[in-house]
Image (spheres, rainbow, N blue to C red):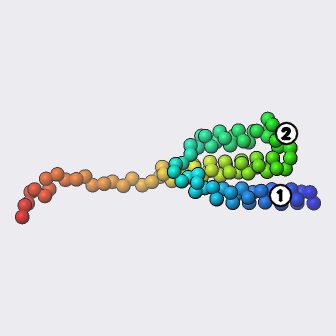
Amino acid sequence: MALLTQFLITLIIAIVALVAYNFLKPFIFKKAIPNKWVILSLLIIAFFTPLLLPMLYSNIIGSSIFFILITLLALTFVDVLRIEKAEKNKPIVGKPKAKPNRSNKNPR
């Protein structure tokens, strides 16, 4: 029974994190795309913080906040990678060069 309760709590926290990410996504990517290395470093710091400060992770609220923070940072990192890959694979459109003196050859 305790395993089922823990699973349901984790599922609810994951759903809250996904809803929060979808709500914050327009604000994160509104003006500029954040740097992927900054997001990755924040993700690593947030991932290893509970090991360094176990007192913050000991209660359910602290563990839930860290779980939501890690989920938000991971989703943001994956989204930045997806956007960068899409921008890198844009087709190159060749523009025709302007032909000088074309209109001056046959004046009518």
Give the percent coordinates (x, y) of residue 90. Answer: 45, 54
User: Is 100 on the left-hand or right-hand side of 27?
Assistant: left
Give the percent coordinates (x, y) of residue 65. Answer: 76, 49
The residue positioned farthest toward the right in the image shown: 1
Q: Quadrant of residue 4?
A: bottom right
From this view, report whether residue 45 is shown above or below residue 100. above
The residue positioned farthest toward the left in the image shown: 108
Q: Residues within 10 Å of mark 1 (few under 14, many from 20)?
A: some
Which marked residue is nearer to the observer: mark 1 or mark 2? 2
Give the percent coordinates (x, y) of residue 103. Answer: 13, 58
Q: CA distance from mark 1 to mark 2?
A: 20 Å
Give the residue at mark 1: 9
Q: Residues within 10 Å of mark 2 (few under 14, many from 20)?
A: few
Nearer the N terminus, badge 1 or badge 2? Answer: 1
Q: Secondary structure at mark 1?
A: helix
Give the residue at mark 2: 55
Q: Quadrant of residue 5?
A: bottom right
Give the percent coordinates (x, y) of residue 3. Answer: 89, 57
| Residue 84 visible to an observer of this rendering | no
